Image: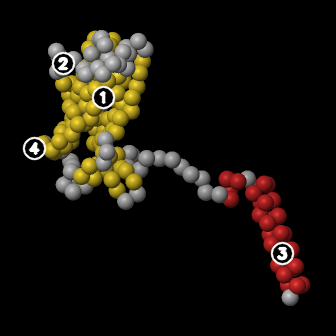
């Protein structure tokens, strides 16, 4: 029995050494799977939506002590006769920014493997303002499905600033 055990240990060591040599000489790429990062659903059927600027003339952002920061960065959504209605706002503290904007708007649907981008928005930008906003209507929502919305708020006020924002998941 002791001889069988020794033989098993020797065979295991030889096999380990052979595997290490294969990885060393053949390269790790040929022995292992390569991970390829890609967002599922982006290349498929993604709706591209046009954003409309919201007239916010005369509206002052709520500042709460901010001096040169982005404030009032909100994403709100509601059911409407046209489907999912989205309004996104961006503001700056204490003054007028040379420009404020919203970009990289995404509507994602929860699927069994994670999140699938189903629509993107064109975003928008406005010059010489203290607050701006866009609205988007997405008609292809399905009742009972789970969604989330994300975007990037940006502006130039004492330098360029960006802020990523995302809603919690919600059921339409």
Tell me which label, 3 or 2, sits earlier in the chain: 3
The residue at which mark 4 appears reads as: 81
| Residue at the left extreme of this rendering | 81
The residue at which mark 1 appears reads as: 73
Of marks 4 and 2, the one in the foreground:
2
The residue at which mark 3 appears reads as: 9
Relative image position of residue 117 (x, y in whole percent): 34, 46
Q: Are marks 2 and 1 in contact (CB under 8 Å)?
A: no
Q: Are marks 3 and 2 in contact (CB under 8 Å)?
A: no
> Tag 2's secondary structure?
loop
Tell me which label, 2 or 1, sits earlier in the chain: 2
Which quarter of the rendering shows the N terminus? bottom right
Q: Are marks 4 and 1 in contact (CB under 8 Å)?
A: no
Q: Residue at x 12, y 42 (%)?
A: 80
Q: Are marks 4 and 2 in contact (CB under 8 Å)?
A: no
Relative image position of residue 28 (x, y in whole percent): 70, 54
């Amino acid at each position: 029995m002791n001889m069988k055990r020794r033989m098993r240990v020797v065979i295991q060591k030889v096999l380990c050494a052979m595997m290490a040599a294969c990885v060393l000489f053949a390269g790790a790429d040929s022995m292992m799977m390569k991970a390829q990062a890609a967002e599922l659903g982006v290349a498929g059927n993604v709706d591209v939506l046009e954003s409309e600027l919201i007239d916010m003339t005369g509206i002052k952002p709520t500042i709460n002590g901010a001096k040169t920061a982005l404030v009032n960065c909100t994403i709100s959504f509601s059911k409407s006769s046209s489907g999912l209605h989205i309004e996104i706002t961006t503001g700056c503290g204490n003054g007028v920014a040379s420009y404020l904007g919203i970009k990289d708007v995404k509507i994602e649907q929860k699927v069994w493997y994670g999140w699938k981008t189903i629509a993107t928005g064109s975003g928008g930008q406005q010059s010489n303002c203290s607050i701006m906003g866009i609205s988007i209507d997405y008609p292809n929502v399905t009742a009972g499905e789970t969604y989330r919305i994300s975007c990037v708020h940006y502006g130039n006020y004492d330098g360029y600033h960006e802020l990523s924002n995302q809603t919690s998941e919600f059921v339409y």
